[in-house]
């Protein structure tokens, strides 16, 4: 191991894909991670879920159980390993099975793990075995979790020592609740026991306060609650009825109004009625008359019949006497006053959580020693914690021995990714549009991922993947080679996960960015072709619509043809203004095209360079923009959107990015038969048209006149140029001035 002059680790770095990363190749590199400045780490945290990595290992690393493994937690694991192992060399192998010989016998941590591992192997029926595998440790941990006392301080009712204590635990869970045990069952804890008995005591004291003034607060004993509830349920309606009776006594003219008009009954009757009809419940409780008592046994509003019966049987008869079938306003006021102390006491209710158990059960639980037995069960469970924790430490060692080196090479550095191995964040491979892409990341939160991933500068395809018997998942796939012409929402492909299972994949969203320089080169021409096709289609559709409209009106036009001819003077076949405008337009286009072609043909042997210049002029801007964006492609936002904290500029330069997507190619040594029985017939006239047009242009602009003078007749363009040159020469001779160069008309 190389070290610096002060004894610290001399780190080695390497460059891949345009990114500098630390090289972690030895066990000593892993154990020295606390010395490496975290600013040089590629990531500082990663999620526990959604990775192609053993989730149980990540859960053990996630000490605070917040769903993310942070740099500090990884360093804590490294520090623990340093104390437990006396020979860490095998960490880099990733083997399933940690030899007991590598465990330290001089540190307390190592001694505890070693003793627990040997005991574990004996319990599993493997005495004398010198290697503990992940399966061995996991089985021992599972047995410990299902044991009666598993050390987590949570005791399910089934683990209680007797039936009475078990029933008390069930009452506790049904009222104040508990916590999940390591075995997956709900159980009681020291905190829940204290809360339960606090509720029991408060509820008992609340009842004791009422019993101390039973005659005042509980005039009907246990039936007082039902009486109070019956009064409360109908109090507003009875108060309303007595007020109406007083209004009727005040003025006889109000008699009809307080009983509601006939129209109110007609409106209610016009609908389908039921005893719970809202319109019916709004009508008076009974017929209103001045000075009348409420007849509890007589006719009342049917919508309130149940409440009236409950009032009579639960409150009026018990408090006013069995013979009471009517209720005066004075009696009603006295009845409410009689129950007022109970209502005041009820508002101070305490221990409501345990009230469903009943007062008798509450007193029974408080009277016995069941609390002490519950607390004793929790104490016995906690006493097993050191033994269970020791077994857990053995599992931790076995998993770290197998998985930790791979994790640091996908966390501290992205060695697996840049070495073109499968990194832990790569979910599989997408086959789509005659290509495969390996940079596929499972999306945990689609909304969050969509807002951040676009900043990666990568062309992304979001695909929803489904497979019988599995939950649907969404993956974001980076397209880094080929083109985007045939990529669109709704297109189907096949996704292979890391286990080799195939999923149906459908594109649901696309984030557009440049894919390659090659695509950028052809992009302007493809856009032009698409634009022309769209315009042609629009013009054709418009012409078709116009033709249909003309055909629809043809019959009317023919029928009225004679009248139209007689009344309308004939239009000229050609408009002079139109012809003039067309002439000007054609002349302008011809002049511009002529100037362009003259300049091009004037290049002579440099014409290929001129053609190259035109191509660069068209494709250059698109290629420059693509080149700039491709250099900015960054893996970070793709992972940050999934809960990672990527700490470095994890770039994907052009060569590395191109390696992530493979376009279909014929395999080496393949033989290709170019004869196509369905090939479109070739038409030679197209080639001849192009050739003749090129020759005509050369002749028109005088190229042949320069090569073979006086062999072909001169074009009008050449004659004009020569005439213009002659006139300029004559004018120059007259003025003794040099003749100006001839210019195209």
Image: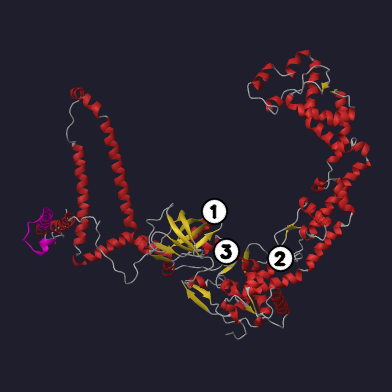
Mark 1 or mark 2: which comes first in sequence?
A: 2
Mark 1 or mark 3: which comes first in sequence?
A: 1
Depth order, front residue of 542/334: 334
Question: Left or right: where does residue 100 sit relative to residue 540?
Answer: right
Circle 3: is it few (<14), some (14-19), or many (20+) Cα within 10 Å? many
Residue 498 x %, y %: 51, 65
Question: Left or right: where does residue 735 sit relative to residue 553?
Answer: left
Q: Quadrant of residue 598?
A: bottom left
Instruction: Identify the residue shown where x is 68% and y is 25%.
Output: 279
Pick the quarter of the image with the N terminus: bottom right
According to the picture, the residue beneath numbered tag 2 turns out to be 145
Depth order, front residue of 92/254: 92
According to the picture, the residue beneath numbered tag 3 turns out to be 644
According to the picture, the residue beneath numbered tag 1 turns out to be 447
Residue 111 x %, y %: 72, 80
Instruction: Identify the residue shown where x is 72% and y is 70%.
Output: 389
Q: How many marks do you count on the picture?
A: 3
Which marked residue is nearer to the observer: mark 1 or mark 2? 2
Instruction: Identify the residue shown where x is 89% and y is 30%.
Output: 319
Q: Which residues are magenta?
A: 703-728
Residue 545 x %, y %: 30, 37
């Amino acid at each position: 191991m190389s070290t610096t002059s002060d004894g610290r680790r001399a780190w080695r770095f390497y460059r891949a894909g345009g990114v500098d990363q630390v090289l972690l190749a030895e066990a000593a590199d892993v154990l020295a991670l606390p010395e490496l400045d975290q600013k040089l780490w590629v990531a500082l945290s990663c999620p526990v879920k959604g990775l192609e990595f053993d989730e149980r290992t990540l859960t053990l690393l996630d000490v605070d159980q917040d769903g993310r493994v942070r740099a500090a937690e990884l360093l804590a694991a490294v520090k623990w390993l340093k104390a437990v192992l006396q020979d860490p060399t095998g960490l880099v192998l990733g083997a399933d099975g940690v030899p007991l010989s590598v465990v330290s016998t001089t540190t307390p941590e190592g001694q505890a793990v070693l003793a627990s591992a040997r005991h574990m192997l004996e319990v599993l029926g493997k005495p004398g075995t010198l290697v503990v595998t992940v399966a061995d440790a996991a089985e021992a941990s599972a047995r410990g979790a299902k044991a009666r006392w598993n050390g987590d301080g949570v005791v399910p009712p089934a683990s209680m020592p007797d039936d009475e204590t078990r029933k008390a635990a069930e009452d506790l869970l049904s009222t104040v609740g508990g916590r999940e045990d390591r075995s997956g069952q709900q159980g009681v804890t020291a905190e829940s026991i204290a809360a339960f008995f606090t509720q029991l005591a408060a509820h008992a004291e609340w009842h004791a306060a009422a019993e101390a003034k039973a005659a005042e607060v509980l005039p009907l004993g246990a039936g007082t609650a039902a009486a109070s509830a019956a009064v409360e349920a109908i109090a507003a309606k009875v108060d309303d009825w007595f007020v109406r009776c007083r209004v009727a006594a005040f003025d006889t003219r109000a008699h009809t109004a307080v009983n509601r008009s006939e129209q109110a009954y007609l409106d209610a009757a016009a609908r389908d009625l039921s005893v719970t009809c809202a319109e019916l419940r709004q009508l008076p409780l009974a017929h209103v008359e001045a000075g009348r008592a409420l007849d509890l046994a007589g006719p009342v509003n049917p919508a309130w019949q149940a409440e009236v019966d409950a009032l009579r049987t639960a409150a009026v008869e018990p408090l006013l006497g069995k013979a009471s079938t009517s209720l005066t306003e004075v009696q009603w006021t006295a009845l409410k006053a009689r129950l007022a102390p109970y209502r005041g006491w009820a508002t101070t209710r305490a221990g409501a959580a345990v009230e469903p158990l009943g007062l008798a059960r509450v007193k029974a639980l408080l009277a016995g020693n069941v609390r002490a037995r519950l607390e004793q069960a929790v104490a016995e469970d906690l006493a097993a914690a050191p033994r269970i924790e020791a077994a857990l430490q053995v599992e931790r060692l076995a998993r770290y021995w197998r998985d930790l080196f791979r994790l640091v090479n996908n966390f501290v550095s992205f060695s697996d990714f840049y070495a073109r191995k499968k990194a832990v964040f790569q979910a599989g491979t997408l086959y789509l549009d005659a290509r495969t892409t390996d940079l596929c990341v499972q999306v945990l939160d689609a909304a969050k991922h969509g807002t951040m991933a676009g900043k990666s500068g990568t062309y992304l395809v979001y695909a929803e993947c489904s497979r019988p018997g599995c939950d649907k998942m969404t993956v974001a796939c980076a397209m880094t080679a080929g083109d985007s012409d045939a990529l669109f929402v709704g297109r189907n492909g096949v996704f292979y996960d890391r286990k080799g299972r195939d999923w149906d994949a459908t594109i649901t969203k696309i984030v557009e960015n440049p894919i390659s320089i090659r695509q950028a080169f052809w992009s302007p021409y493809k856009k032009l072709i698409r634009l022309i096709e769209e315009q042609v289609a629009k013009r054709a559709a418009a012409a078709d619509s116009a033709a249909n409209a003309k055909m629809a009106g043809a019959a009317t036009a023919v029928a009225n043809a004679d009248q139209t001819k007689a009344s309308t003077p004939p239009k000229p076949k050609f408009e002079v203004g139109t012809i003039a405008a067309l002439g000007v337009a054609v002349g302008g286009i011809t002049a511009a095209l002529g100037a362009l072609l003259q300049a091009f043909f004037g290049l002579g042997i440099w014409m290929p360079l001129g053609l190259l210049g035109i191509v660069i002029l068209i494709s250059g801007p698109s290629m420059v923009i693509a080149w700039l964006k491709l250099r900015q492609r960054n893996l970070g936002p793709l992972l940050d959107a999934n809960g990672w904290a990527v700490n470095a500029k994890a770039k994907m330069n052009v060569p590395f990015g191109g390696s992530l997507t493979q376009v279909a190619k014929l395999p080496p040594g393949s033989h290709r038969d170019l004869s196509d029985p369905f090939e479109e017939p070739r038409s030679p006239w197209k080639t001849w048209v192009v050739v003749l047009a090129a020759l005509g242009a050369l002749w028109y602009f005088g190229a042949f006149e320069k090569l073979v003078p006086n062999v072909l007749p001169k074009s009008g363009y050449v004659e004009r140029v020569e005439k213009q040159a002659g006139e300029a020469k004559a004018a120059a001779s007259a003025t003794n001035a040099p003749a100006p160069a001839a210019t195209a008309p």
